[in-house]
Image (spheres, coloured by chain):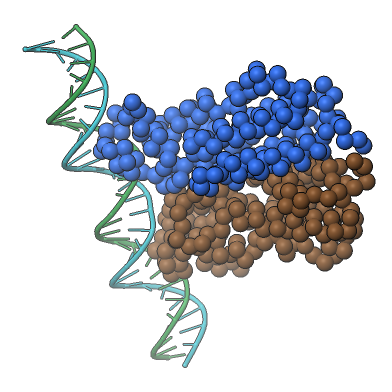
Chain colours: A brown, B blue, C cyan, D green
Amino acid sequence: MESTKERIKNTALDLFAKEGYAGSSIRNIAKIVGIRESAIYNHYGSKEEIIEAIFIDFKKNSESTGLLTDELLDEIENPYKFISDFCEKLLRFWDTPKQKKLIRLLMVEEFRDYKIDKLSLNDLIEDLRKIWEMIFAEITKYGLIKSFDTKVLANEFIAPLFFIRLQFLTDENRDGLNNAIKETKKHVNFFWNAIDSDKKL
Amino acid sequence: MESTKERIKNTALDLFAKEGYAGSSIRNIAKIVGIRESAIYNHYGSKEEIIEAIFIDFKKNSESTGLLTDELLDEIENPYKFISDFCEKLLRFWDTPKQKKLIRLLMVEEFRDYKIDKLSLNDLIEDLRKIWEMIFAEITKYGLIKSFDTKVLANEFIAPLFFIRLQFLTDENRDGLNNAIKETKKHVNFFWNAIDSDKKL
DNA sequence: AAATTATATGAACGATCGTTAATCTAAAAA
DNA sequence: TTTTTAGATTAACGATCGTTCATATAATTT
């Protein structure tokens, strides 16, 4: 069972991600949860504390590194397959309601001044950049692709990927994930064609 | 001289783009402009009307098509130079304070429900996609690059470009533009290398 | 100069905001 | 069973919200 404290936090996330922090009221959160507004203060000391709890949660659970399992990494000698599979894994993770709400929240709250060290879109992108830079460094080491600056490679790869992620945020149609996978395949094919060492210069 | 009405609109844009619509108050706008809050209603009927006016302004002035001048299009037989030059033109446009505020506003207000048909990030992206699809169709027609689906080409090209645009939103350091130009050069080089017909398959 | 118009002011309205306090109730601990 | 604790309620606080109104002042038109 979901505790009242968690229901408050989840409801707050729903509202904050749609209406922004300033546009969401304690009373509205309480009404949706089904309690009076004063009862919220038995669980959180203030409105600020709620959004801080939300950010802390996401800090713990939003690193993509966890998706890089050992069995996936064993596939790295077949880079094309590895890249495709890892992309699909990322897309499935990003298709999660929680992850969609995270992006919306970060967009909506990106520019306000915060006392706490809140998560930002840049943090997510940096995380993604690091992983893919590592992946391309590995692939390059094995001589499986042409030689590029791995930083450039990572940037060029994640930009369309993140683009697709943003694209399918608003789409609430049931087939968002499948379309995202389809678009990503096109991207991977184009990209692979550009870096594949079998294509001779 | 800037009229009071314009100063209200510009100040509102500053605040809305940073704190969001709900997070900005009429009183705060008035205070910055240097008038009392009631005076605002001599110029705008409501708070809503102010943001509507902002969106209408941007709808008139944010299409990138205007940057595609005839003298630029004459360069299209030299696709690499054409692409580089047009990118720099775009970056300089996007580096404008107004355009930076537009992106911030669209991010912050992306998910709220609007009565009016407000501008959205997707509109900007669609505009950009169309232009570049046209450009690549033209370049392909002249046989200057390998043959790709122009939609894929456009997507692959604008994603890192838009990525860079987002990247340099928050950066208030004076050299944001130069860094953006540098990053874009890397992208154009990678991309050109992937599509150049002189590189033999 | 007089009349009109545009734009400002101060004061107030009802609504809503985040938050607190006193109180009640039901579950848990003793 | 009594005591303690956790979590809910009702009521209210001061602040702020968007907006309106009567009025004053300055600029423009007649």
- Residue at figure coordinates x 60%, y 61% from the top left: A58
- Residue at figure coordinates x 29%, y 28% from the top left: B42
Q: Where, quadrant-wise, is the N terminus of chain B in this rendering?
A: top left
Residue sitting nearer the eye, B24 or A188 = A188
Image location of residue A31, percent across then percent down: 46, 56
Vertically, is B99 above or below B141?
below
Residue sitting nearer the eye, A98 or D12 = A98
Image location of residue B16, percent across then percent down: 44, 41
Image location of residue A130, percent across then percent down: 70, 58
Q: Where, quadrant-wise, is the C terminus of chain B in this rendering?
A: top right
- Residue at figure coordinates x 76%, y 59% from the top left: A134
- Residue at figure coordinates x 30%, y 32% from the top left: B41
Vertically, is C21 above or below B136?
below
Q: Seen in the image, is A60 located left or right of residue C25?
A: right
Q: Seen in the image, is A87 located left or right of residue A125?
A: right
Quarter of the view holding residue D28: top left
Vertically, is B15 above or below D21?
below
Q: Judge whether residue A149 can be spotted in this image.
A: yes
Image location of residue A65, percent across then percent down: 72, 62
Quarter of the view holding residue A64: bottom right
Q: Judge whether residue B26 can be spotted in this image.
A: no
Vertically, is A13 above or below B18?
below
Q: Seen in the image, is C27 located left or right of residue D11?
A: right
Q: Seen in the image, is A102 located left or right of residue A183?
A: left
How many numbered dots are placed on residues in this image?
Answer: 0
